[in-house]
Image (spheres, grey):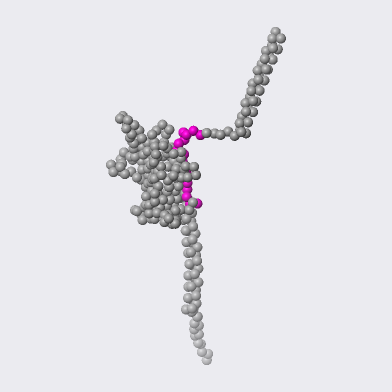
Amino acid sequence: MKKNYNIIRIQKGFSLAELIVALTIAAMVLVAVLSIYSRAESSSDAVTRKLNSSQLISEVLQRIAEDFDRIIASDSDTTITIINKFEKGFPTSRLIIRKNIDNNKNQKQKFEETVWQTSFDYDTGSNGLVLYRSHTGMTLEDKLLDEKREDWEKIDSYVPICTGVTFFKVEVPQGEKFLDRWISNILPHGITVTISFAEPFETVQGTLDVHDTEKIVRTIAIDRTRKIRFDITSKEKQVEEEKEETKEKEAEKEVEEKETEQKEDKKGK
């Protein structure tokens, strides 16, 4: 008789060492993929942040220039006040553009005033400055909004424009130098506004600064009615004299031709 035996084959599984090696390799691959993704995301955020900050800076500088264009006129009593200082190490500035008028008693009265200034950001806790803008006076920028302001808003009308500013400076160019303070009834020929959102570094003096490559500077002309003298070089003078001589010769030829024609007409008659 033949006997049938049921043979049970036992398949071997992974050993503990093999599992540990596989998990280790998988973890290394996952960490590498996550690090690459994190770097790509941070680079994308940095580029987006830089583009947004550049666009925001352009809008801020354009608005400051528009304030000058609107308020300053050749026949108006306008004053500009510029004060620069440091707050918590950050360079801050205060720019005041004020137009005055004379009332019926010949007394100076504020007609319109716009203020641009930066202050340390105590509210959000971020290590930076907040840029504010204020507009007060007899004129209304937005009639609908200005008329609905409360009394305290009319007195303290500073509106936050943007946060995260790390450098803000307003200066008056004087030749090769720049004045960081201007308190005078005479308007300067122009001003320079410098602003940045870049990461600051500490200087030797203990203040904070930003690399020049990260600063955006705009020069705004103020006194557009000043007289500009033009110096003509000797070559230009010579060219002008030659043109004058040519014109005189052409005029003389025309006179001679007219005289000749008149003589011929008389002979024909």
Q: Is residue 70 visible?
A: no
Q: Is residue 216 magenta?
A: yes
Residue at position x 41%, y 44% in the image: 181
In the displayed structure, would residue 69 be above or below residue 127? above
Identified at 47% across, 42% down, the residue is 174
**Measured from the top left, where is residue 176 in percent x and y?**
49, 44
The answer to whether 165 appears left or right of 18 in the picture is left
For the C terminus, the quadrant is: top right
- In the image, taking residue 150 as reference, residue 94 lies left or right, namely right
Residue 186 part of the magenta-drawn span = no
Picture coordinates of residue 267, whole percent (x, y): 71, 9
Say which residue appears at 46% left-offset and 53% top-offset: 210
- Left/right placement of residue 139 relative to residue 260 reads left
Q: Is residue 32 visible?
A: yes
> Where is 233 relative to 214, above or below?
above
Total tally of numbered discs in the picture: 0
Which residues fall within the magenta stretch? 213-228
